[in-house]
Image: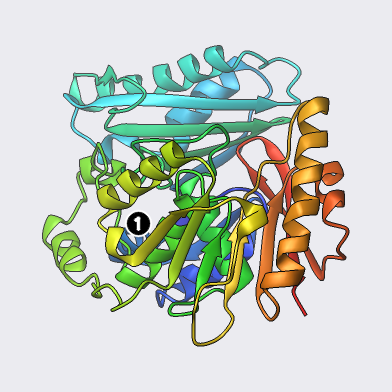
Amino acid sequence: MPRFLAITSRGLLEPLAVEIEKLEVKRVKKRGDSVEFEGSWADLYRVHLNSRIATRVLLPVADFTAYNQEDLYFGVLRKHDFTKYIRPKQTIRVEAHVREHKNLTDQRFVAMKVKDAVVDQFRKKCDMRPDVGDEESADLRIVVRIVGNEVSLALDLTGESLSYRGYRKFMGDAPIREHVAAGLLRLAGWKFPTPLIDPFCGSGTILIEAALDGHGFSPLHRRRPFAFENLLNFQPSVYADLKKALPRKAAPSKPLLFGYDKDPEVLEKARANARAAGVENWILFQQRDVADLKAPATEAPGMMITNPPYGERLEDTEVAKELMTTFAKTLKNEFKGWDCWILNGNPEAAAGLKLKARVKVPIWNAQIDCRLLNYPIT
């Protein structure tokens, strides 16, 4: 049975593992910087159609030791048969990552040597060779990782990142990636129909991901097929049946998701993104300054999950710190009983809250080392 590796951002392995386990996939475990699972190719399709936290899935195919370029070339040539995945008239692309090797230091050279070995396999077996495809549409995507003298080869079965949902037509200055937003919801323990507020909603990503969770998630409007759809073993009828089985729920009679921002132009972009995602009826967007926020009229207190501006430059940090002080006053005065979760990438700005976090979860958003901070408002 194939063994797959699901990849995500640092800090999201635990919710990703739980997510895959809930899909009734066998033998799920965290392994290094990925989540390993065993299953059928139908299980792989199911993960791609349902995972909201993974960014891509790899199929490990070979591991060996290489001290020089000859070892690398012949290791690829002999350790695995790549001709079983595509026809010679299709395309290939190699992505290389190298660390701590004395002789193999140029990633472009490593990618070229791996490509040479793969196309030579095709020449010998088929008397033809595949062309090199572009970064976005190659049929067979090979990932080579070298750490020290150890080489790992894997196939990228996803292609365009799972984080790309296709609904973000407009983005703010510091957008949160879609899979990170989904991960925040899982880490905070939010579940529909718990009321949810984002007081710094920006382009609306956190709330849209929450709505998709309630509505029934799908990959939405991907620009390109998944990479596994280009392989010879692809089972289109199985994949089609899994797509048909995806659940769909109607919008609630009244919104339980609330997005606020002081900039009306930003709110229009958030509304446009929600329309593109098909969840505009799930979310109420309103223009509000954080100093003037009031808790919405819900049956019970809910949750607040947000990614406020935290300032990357010194002068921005001071402004962000003052904003957090204002935000804290609003929380204490207007949101008693609510559970607040804040993603922060600048401890100095977060200090403006003058609140003690009950939980601090390390998480990366793009290249920023952040903390997801929990403040129950009592």
188 vs 231: above or below: below
Q: How many residues crowd around disc 1 within 10 Å: few (fewer than 14), some, or many (20 or more)?
A: many
* Residue drawn 19% across the image and 19% down it: 128
- What residue is drawn where x is 40% and y is 46%? 270
Residue 372: in sight, yes or no? Answer: no
User: In the figure, residue 129 lies in which quadrant?
Assistant: top left
Which residue is more in the foreground, 225 or 68? 225
Q: Quadrant of the N terminus?
A: bottom left
Q: How many marks?
A: 1
Query: Which image quarter holds the C terminus?
Result: bottom right
Pointer 1: what residue? 48
From the top left corner, tell me how far across and down residue 56 is, in percent.
Answer: 44, 47
Image point 20% across, 27% down: which residue? 90
In the image, 94 versus 198, the foreground residue is 198
Camera-side residue of 19 and 216: 216
Q: Quadrant of residue 71?
A: top right
Q: Position of residue 259 (x, y in %)?
A: 48, 57
Q: Position of residue 2 (x, y in %)?
A: 40, 59
Residue 294 versus residue 124 in the image, above or below:
below
Residue 194 at x, y = what percent? 49, 79
Give the SS element for disc 1: helix
Instruction: Note whether residue 170 is visible.
Output: yes
Task: Identify the residue shown where x is 67% and y is 45%.
Answer: 364
